[in-house]
Amino acid sequence: MDNTTEILSTSKYPAKAHAAKVASYLQSHSPFADGILYLESQKTRIIEDNDEPVPFRQRRYFFYLSGCDLADSCLTYDIRTKHLTLFIPPINPDSVIWSGLPVSPAQALKLYDVDDVRPTCDINAYLASRDVGADRSGSCVWAIPEQVSDHITFLAFDRKEVSGLKDAIEECRVVKDEYEIALIKKANEVSAIAHTAVLKAVKHARNERELEAIFLERCIANGAREQAYHGIFASGKNAATLHYQKNNEELVGKLNLLLDAGGEWRCYASDITRTFPINGRFSKESKEIFDIVLRMQRECMNMLKEGVIWDNVHARAHEIAIEGLLDLGILRGGKKEIFRKRTSVAFFPHGLGHYLGMDTHDTGGHADYEDTDGMFRYLRVRGMLPAGSVITVEPGIYFCRFIIEPYLDDPAHKAYIDKKVLDRYWDVGGVRVEGECDLW
């Protein structure tokens, strides 16, 4: 039994530790923070003009403090007593006919790291009870305003804080504990199986959708029913589109496949990208670009450690891209001048990576999408990386006419790009290589 399997099979998701962590964060920013944290799970919703439910995806804020994947639930955490209470739907006889018996309070108490489990029909009475809201001078409830149902009442509380809880959870989610790391590793293990299956099948497949089907089947067969994001199965020039979605074009005559896909394990994401030749052998131009991207990825991975400035790692990736494209003759001129002019953004337009956790693009990165510096505008994480964070490193070089051609017409950039050499690389489409690193 490996360490990941042992952790996940012998312990519960650490909901109470997460709740205490969030409460501590609130108190560090508001020394007199007290009262109750209140969170709701995702609601059962019905598709418009249909009687089928919308595919369920648990709210991550609720899951972080509960580890519970049930719909139509809620929780409270008493900051003073450190008491975590989960409220789950009571038995509905009409629903049992169609869906079977739901999780009972006794079962939920065994499944989840909480102190008490009650039916959701008790929540308003609980919030109004003397030991929660009433008779506490200056009592306060913390909630996320857009995630509070209309029937919930906070009348027993003197104060309602609706601006701090969401931010507190997002910041706390940046640093992962051992259990969270195990969940991400498990998601990666399953996704690696699916990636390998696609790699084995690509030479004989005819359409991108066949490869997507193989990936989904392998994930589901190995226990990951949900995908962390819509997978990218981009052949040929389609790989020049960063978040290509169609996944339905023929493979014949295409050079490479860019596969960016990851399964999800108990609400935690994986995110893996590989680029490989469809016929089993890279063309000369494809191999040249792949080697540059691989160097970008490896050198940037080697830079990672607690306290490193992510902006500097991203900048180094651009420097390596410039060096490689100069060697190929696609770029020309001085390396420092090209970097200063930001001409490399034409070929590497996105950020180097992002935090990974319950969301593929996880919280707490403090991106600045209004940054006027095009090299950093789409960088999803800014500043120092703390110990315990998990970040992806996914450099890429792309040949997208829509992005590059304006650079060819721009006096500030066209002198640095050799169009005659560039024309040999359009069919490469795009190359991206992505892995994750947890900083301990």
Image (cartoon, rainbow, N blue to C red):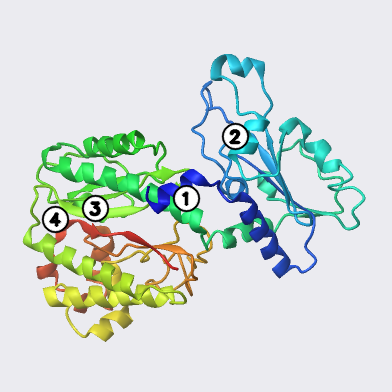
How many marks the image carries: the answer is 4
10 Å neighbourhood of mark 4: few (<14), some, or many (≥20)? Answer: many
Q: Is residue 267 left or right of residue 218?
A: right
- Disc assigned to residue 344: none
Sequence-wise, the earlier of marks 4 and 1 is 1
Q: Give coordinates of residue 224: x percent, y percent.
A: 39, 39
Sequence-wise, the earlier of marks 4 and 2 is 2
* Mark whose residue sits in front, 2 or 1: 1
Q: Give coordinates of residue 268: x percent, y percent.
A: 46, 48
Separation of marks 4 and 1 at Cα, in angstroms: 46 Å
Separation of marks 4 and 3 at Cα, in angstroms: 10 Å
User: Can residue 268 be seen in the rendering of this structure?
Assistant: yes
Separation of marks 3 and 1 at Cα, in angstroms: 38 Å
| Residue 78 vertical position relative to residue 331 in the rendered view, above or below | above
Which of 84 and 273 lies nearest the eye of the viewer?
Answer: 84
10 Å neighbourhood of mark 3: few (<14), some, or many (≥20)? Answer: many
Sequence-wise, the earlier of marks 2 and 3 is 2
What residue occupies the far front of the structure in this picture? Answer: 1
The amino acid marked with disc number 3 is Ala
Label 1 element class: helix
Sequence-wise, the earlier of marks 4 and 3 is 3
* Mark whose residue sits in front, 4 or 2: 2
Tell me the residue that label 4 is attached to. Answer: 427
Q: Is residue 60 left or right of residue 342?
A: right
Q: Is residue 367 left or right of residue 2?
A: right
The amino acid marked with disc number 2 is Ala
Q: Quadrant of residue 430?
A: bottom left
Tell me the residue that label 3 is attached to. Answer: 239
Tell me the residue that label 1 is attached to. Answer: 7
